[in-house]
Image (spheres, grey):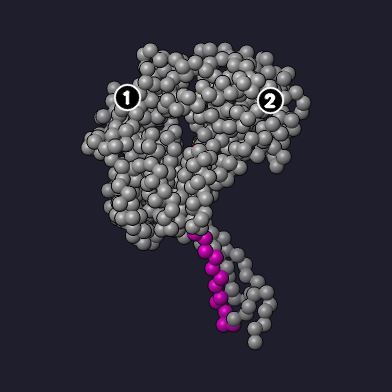
Amino acid sequence: MTDLASALERCGIPSDMVSGGSLTVTSPVDGNEIAHLHETPMAAMPGIIDASVDAFKQWRVTPAPVRGELVRLWGEELRALKADIGHIISVEVGKITEEGLGEVQEAIDICDLAVGQSRQMFGKTIVSERPGHRIMEQYHPIGPVAIITAFNFPCAVFAWNATMALITGNPILFKPSEKSPLSGIATLKALEKAIARFGEAPEGLAQLVIGGVPQSEALVESPAIPVVSATGSTRMGRIVGQKVAARFGRRILELGGNNAMVVTPEANLDLAVRGILFGAVGTAGQRCTSLRRLIVHERVKDALMEKVLAAYGSLKIGDPLEPGTLVGPLIDARAHETFVAAIARAQAEGGTLLTGGDRVLGDTAPDAYYVAPAIVDMPGQSAVVKEETFGPLLYVLTYSGDLEEAIDLHNDVPQGLSSCIFSDNMREVEVFVSAAGSDCGMANVNIGPSGAEIGGAFGGEKETGGDRESGSDAWKQYTRRTTNTINYSTELPLAQGINFG
Ligand code: UN1
């Protein structure tokens, strides 16, 4: 049986690192304080950033496949520590055991992808209009990359960014969420073990910054850090995006979602129910990809909702480490207040609460916030439905006309992360994924909006930020592209036929 202290120890986190400091970490499982971390003093920030700049000089000239070898070792360390890091995630974030382990697996998967990618940073060769000339593009390292993560994916989202930054030749500066730093530190410790085995990595290649807004600001505002990747709320992203833009840095933003599922009359309803359950209730609705809006055709609404409500009725809510639990706690009291307030607003805006919303286990876990997942039937897409509420709250919207009506409703929110349609009709699904369909960064067919694999690019449009992380060609964002025109002739012809003297 794993306990937190031994998991931390096996991950190489010394006890003095998690005690005596001013940053208190609380477990959402029972509300107990589990760590008191030392914040990175602001006076230390310039030295940390300088060390990263120094590390860049060596790392950028280390051959990319050799950099890939470091990430391969990181994947090995993560495999060895999977159970321990998964356990830390469960205690610190409140994820059920399966999902804690799944998050570590996601980090392992991105390591594997990055190892292969480290040998495939292809640039194009372009024909020249001039004789004896050739044009080519190269993707070079860009410089230190700051990674600021949210509480809900402390291991995987860090790994998405760190793996790609490392193989492309850049040092990393990691600032985990104040709410879940231990899971992030455990993931970083696995990288430190890999660095020790690797042997030739520069000092300062992977550094940790603990703290809150001031420490984040030091990273966001530093001109020595060309790329800032930040995951979190739209409110945070608006500030970070503007600050990074003001100094012409590059930002990678992954912000709020308001993810929907369209269920058409031609859907397999049993499949849809399973998609709804994992999407809306999994991770207690605390994924940025969680299902928040169900847009269902009136012809199948009653049949679907009967099945959904039956499934909600049998959900086991409680200790995420206990086998069989499907719904763990909300992260903190504030998340609970927001959840309750959103339901009250939805009701005031004409909604009918179909199930859930109550706090449960209040007597056995008075300092933890467990809730019964809620479903609110809405007469229309009112103001509250257009906001992201980070919890297990699902709004039901009904359409009665054609698919276009559902798509209009679907796209009429400020966020654009993930989406899905359930239908066995190929015309409907093709329209949904077409240019006239979902306006999100991710549009799925017959699977829910959450739980993406790492192979695709992850991210969304509109207030979600517009950037992409994880697989596909996301690695390019951690590089600077250079276009090289090479003249191997003995003449100097000018482009566009210009005759200069
Ligand atoms: C997040 O919630 O910030 O697609 C990331 C998913 C996960 C990643 C979620 N693979 O739900």
The residue at the point 37 percent across, 46 percent down is 215
In the rendered image, which quarter is residue 132 located in?
bottom right
Element type where label 2 sits in the image: loop
| Type of the residue with mark 1 | Asn
In the image, the residue with mark 2 has its CB under 8 Å from the nearest atom of ligand 1: no
Foreground: 244 or 347?
Answer: 347
The residue at the point 55 percent across, 46 percent down is 467
| Type of the residue with mark 2 | Gly
Indicate whether residue 203 is drawn in magenta. no
Q: Residue 302: x percent and y percent?
A: 68, 15
- Residue 250 in view: no
In the image, is residue 155 above or below residue 356? below
Q: Residue 127: x percent and y percent?
A: 62, 67
The residue at the point 48 percent across, 29 percent down is 286
Which residue in the protein does label 2 denote?
A: 380
State the CA–CA distance, disc 2 to disc 1.
41 Å
In the rendered image, which quarter is residue 311 located in?
top right
Residue reaching furthest left? 16
Q: Which residues are magenta?
A: 480-491
Which residue in the protein does label 1 denote?
A: 32
In the rendered image, which quarter is residue 381 located in?
top right
Foreground: 483 or 242?
Answer: 242
> Marks 1 and 2: in contact by CB < 8 Å?
no
- Residue 34 in view: yes
Quadrant of the snapshot with the N terminus = top left
Q: Residues within 10 Å of mark 1 (few under 14, many from 20)?
A: few
Q: Is residue 278 left or right of residue 168?
A: right
Quadrant of the snapshot with the C terminus = bottom right
Q: Is residue 137 left or right of residue 378?
A: left
The residue at the point 68 percent across, 25 percent down is 380
Indicate whether residue 486 is drawn in magenta. yes
